[in-house]
Amino acid sequence: MITFDEALRNVLEHSQNYGEESVELVDSHGRILAEIIEADRDFPPFDRSTKDGIAIRFDALNSQNQSFKVSGIAQAGSPQLSLDDENCCIEVMTGAIIPQNADTVVMYEHTSKNEDAFIINEAVKQGQNIHYQASDVEKGEVLLQSGIKITPAEIGVLATVGKAQVSVKKLPKVAVISTGNELVDVDKTPLPFQIRKSNSYSLISLLENEKIKGAIHHILDEPSAIKQTLENLLKDYDVLLLSGGVSKGKYDFLPEAFNSLGVEKVFHKVLQRPGKPFWFGKHESYNTTVFSFPGNPVSTFVNYHLYFKPWLNKTLGTDTMQFDVFLDEPYSNSTDLTLFVGVTLKMIEGKLMANTITSTGSGDLLALAKADGFIKVLPKEEIPKGKTVPFIPTKNKGVV
């Protein structure tokens, strides 16, 4: 049996590269950018007004001349006008091109109107209220690096430079597989010895957060059916995510089935809790990666975040979020296992404080729903209150 750190290292060593694909801009949100984005022109592309007001020549302003007759109106989205008479002004709207020969904008609030002229009532600084061409970005400057996750902010940048089609990292094709005769569909009423499927739906939802449309499958505890179904899935999918069937029970047939189908075992069982019976392997001929998690809901959920998500991030060329939090209570681990303990987070005096959640074990779905994530506790570790501990986030909350 290997340690958690050894298991994670082995998983990451089997990361893949599925290439790139081009998607519509509106479909790129949440995907990993696979190209460098450069400015296709200066930003702003011209000297633009940052206020609604009047554009003047600063050197025409003096103690004897505070009044400027209007010679035109510059609207955003219209061609550039020209200020030909220094004793005149051009009304200019926010975002409009600064008229030729003008070099200063005075906001309406600092003027008063006298028939067809504006009188300036406040002190004026040359060049005020102008956003100069290329003052933000020059043409050809790198705006976005490859490997970042595309959020609404990046969508705006991509749209600004005209990227109607965006190159993104291609996602793996994933099958989510539950095993066991005791499982029934969500819309069924379980018999006393049955339970409804939950792991599959949790995994499918987690995959959707990564923009992966997983396919749900179920296998009964029957060796021939397991082997036949797995053989077909290994051919059709890049990744198999399984739950159940990898412990020491008499009906845990998956390890034997993997072996008979040519799936090379990288490791089976990890010195951790929850999720100890985790099985990981690779079918080299089909290039299919297999994550076979224990069947208990918390074990499946935790192992997804501990192993599959970092593997996916490395596969897509992006980083896995890692940070520490302060433990708001002492915690003791007397075992030889690495523990992953569910916690809630709260901000206290500028610090993220973690409080452990009371749980009845790996099947406690209610405790799982309460957790903001899990802290990592090393074997034989004694953690005093106030010490920082590694944190694995599982929810997108304001503090997480």
Image (cartoon, rainbow, N blue to C red):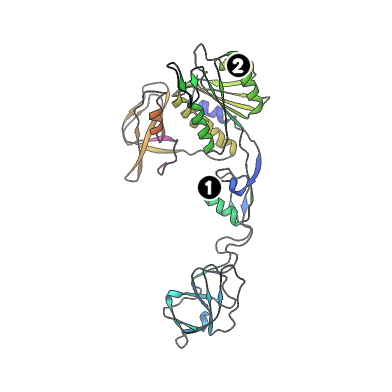
Picture quadrant of residue 40: bottom right
Name the residue located 51 percent from the left edge and 68 percent from the top edge: 94
- In the rendered image, residue 179 lying in the magenta stretch gets the answer no
Q: Amino acid at mark 1?
A: Thr
Q: Residue furthest right?
A: 285
- 98 vs 142: above or below: below
The residue indicated by pointer 1 is: 151
Q: Considering the numbered disc 1 on the image, is that residue within a helix, a strand or a loop?
A: loop
Q: Say whether residue 195 is visible.
A: yes
Q: Specify start and end residues of the magenta stretch as a single range.
A: 388-400
Residue 104, placed above or below residue 240: below
Residue 283 in view (yes/no): no
Observer-nearest residue: 195 or 188? 188
Q: Residues within 10 Å of mark 1 (few under 14, many from 20)?
A: few
Identified at 52% across, 13% down, the residue is 251
Residue 177 on image: x %, y %: 55, 25
* Neighbours of disc 2 within 10 Å: few (<14), some (14-19), many (20+): few
